[in-house]
Amino acid sequence: MAKSPALLPAPRLDQAGHASLLMQDSDDPSLAENVERALRATGYGSLRGVEVAGHARLVILKGRVPSYYLKQVAQQTALSVPNVDQVRNDLEVSRPG
């Protein structure tokens, strides 16, 4: 069931007045750890190096992966973790070499 926009906290504004994707000031290390564990469980070695940050129910993925397929796998894996509602996928695709 989709959440009503009225139930979500208002986004914070940065110094330039842009809305921030981070909905709370506090990081959630347990959420990030659960996503990292799920990425390792996929069996794709390149997903082991993905940096993960958790903020409220938002997960941010950073780093490099060798294909768009693995970028999508990382995103879907993160979304499958309990308590993750949103994923900001900042992974870059670059071939090793």
Image (cartoon, rainbow, N blue to C red):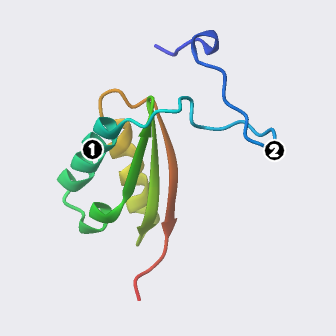
x then y, percent, for residue 12 = 67, 30
**Callout 2 crowding tier (Cα within 10 Å): few <14, some 14–19, many ≥20:** few
27 lies above or below 43: above
x then y, percent, for residue 69 = 41, 61
x then y, percent, for residue 23 = 56, 29
**Quarter that holds the C terminus:** bottom left
Residue, far bottom: 97
Query: Dot 2 lies on which element?
Result: loop
In 3D space, how far apart are the residues under numbered discs 2 and 1 (Cα atoms)? 32 Å
Q: Front-most of 11 and 66? A: 11
Name the residue at 73% across, 34% down. Answer: 13
Name the residue at 77% across, 40% down. Answer: 18
Determine whether, in the image, residue 46 is placed left or right of residue 25. Answer: left
* Amino acid type for the residue under numbered disc 1: Glu
Which residue, given by chain and number where applicable, does mark 2 sit on?
16
Name the residue at 39% across, 31% down. Answer: 84
Which residue, given by chain and number where applicable, does mark 1 sit on?
33
Query: Dot 1 lies on which element?
Result: helix
71 lies above or below 64: above
